[in-house]
Image: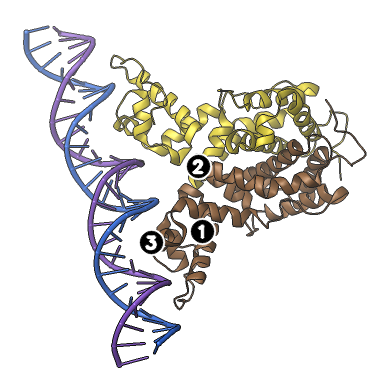
Chain colours: A brown, B yellow, C purple, D blue
Amino acid sequence: MSDRPAPDRRRRDAAATRQAILDAAVAAFTRHGYDGVGVRDIAGNAGVTAMLINRYFGSKEQLFAEAVDVSFAPRTVITGTGRELAASTARTLVSRTAPDAEELGPFLLMLRSAANPRAAEIMREAIGRHAGRHLTEELSGPGAEVRAELMLAVQAGVWLMRHVIGTPALAEAHSEDLAPLVTTLFRSLNPTPADTVPQA
Amino acid sequence: MSDRPAPDRRRRDAAATRQAILDAAVAAFTRHGYDGVGVRDIAGNAGVTAMLINRYFGSKEQLFAEAVDVSFAPRTVITGTGRELAASTARTLVSRTAPDAEELGPFLLMLRSAANPRAAEIMREAIGRHAGRHLTEELSGPGAEVRAELMLAVQAGVWLMRHVIGTPALAEAHSEDLAPLVTTLFRSLNPTPADTVPQA
DNA sequence: AAGCGAACTATACACTTGTAGAATGAGCGA
DNA sequence: TCGCTCATTCTACAAGTGTATAGTTCGCTT
């Protein structure tokens, strides 16, 4: 399970090694999930021995926590603002979940690690710290938190069905056909500021 | 990890034992995912030894395949028909994903097993065989398959954020507040038959 | 060049995993 | 009551898990 070749041997550099481990961890956890990777795999991809993980991070769990933080922090869970938020985010989501796309990201990490309760807890906290807060600010109005989390839910669901499970219609759908549908979904969660939240 | 007490000892009855194993497997895979349970756990909950799993199902993987089929087959992934489909399905989804609800179901099984590629493949096939086909028939019009799978995606996403990750706003939301939002989501995927699919 | 602290590795342990093969024991027809 | 069949269990194995302890070697400082 050596997803990528070990980088050139570093001259002994603690900071660089730590970073290499963290990078390898983000990639590996994203591809295989928390329980799907062993510390030996991660260390191997970083070009070191498994023990260094404990030395620099304390445990696999703490490494995961840092990897989650890295993956969730700067990522563009939403793109665009105001009226363009829905369409822009939908386009980004659709293009990133395309079968050939290779820019993975936090949703994949979340989906593939969700089975582990401790991992789920760690990810919940990271969402609160990063994506959730950010999204809530963008979606004004009553119940912004709930609508923000629903928007995350929709994105996670699309990632799941289109990229992880690989449901045929969704996986093979063309971007130009899929984006409008997803845009509609997002818009129903983010009505233009003057509107009120639609009630059923 | 003995989630439920072993049932009373059966008199030697191959069919009943097989069924007991299958029931225990559905429960265990739903709660912990494919990689999160061992055959010894499942067998223990069924009141037998791990070896019987191989005897009756061939392997853990084949047991999982049967468990997936059982879990996906008769479940009500959608409820109601026509104009009531969106609101009815939303109500069901919201009540089932409530924090205290204890009727689990196929979405949890899917989310918690998604990390394993082989499990994902098995589940994709089961969806095509059951839920996907059923839903597509209900959602007429062009692109029904894609919209059906998007509807599954939304449901999976809500399950994920509300029940698995436990994102605070969604987890604590009252049903009467959440159901209308989800209904809106579903409606945008299932416009009343006379309408055309909304374009962005 | 010597010494020392830090970066890194080797070995090992206790445990769990899925599954194979042989042994056991219950229940039923005779 | 015997004896056979098959449901069920026992024992075992090879592989893999996370991590602790102890050892090795690099490279900077003096």
Q: Element under label 1? A: helix
Q: Chain of mark 3?
A: A
The reply to whether the C-beta atoms of the residues labelled 1 and 2 are less than 8 Å apart is: no
- Where in the figure is residue C5, as x and y percent of width and height? 38, 73
Q: CA distance from mark 1 to mark 3?
A: 14 Å
Closest to the observer, B62 or A45:
A45
Q: CA distance from mark 1 to mark 2?
A: 17 Å
Tell me the residue that label 2 is attached to: A118
- Where in the figure is residue B166, as x and y percent of width and height? 61, 36
The reply, left or right, for residue B23 in relation to residue A170 is left
* Camera-side mark, 1 or 2: 2
- Where in the figure is residue A184, as x and y percent of width and height? 82, 41
Residue occupying the point 64% across, 58% down: A100
The amino acid type found where label 1 is placed reads Ala
Quarter of the N terminus of chain A within the rendering: bottom left
Tell me the residue that label 3 is attached to: A51
Q: Element under label 2? A: helix
The amino acid type found where label 2 is placed reads Arg
* Camera-side mark, 1 or 3: 3
Closest to the observer, B44 or B76:
B44
Residue occupying the point 74% across, 26% down: B179
The amino acid type found where label 3 is placed reads Met
Tell me the residue that label 1 is attached to: A25
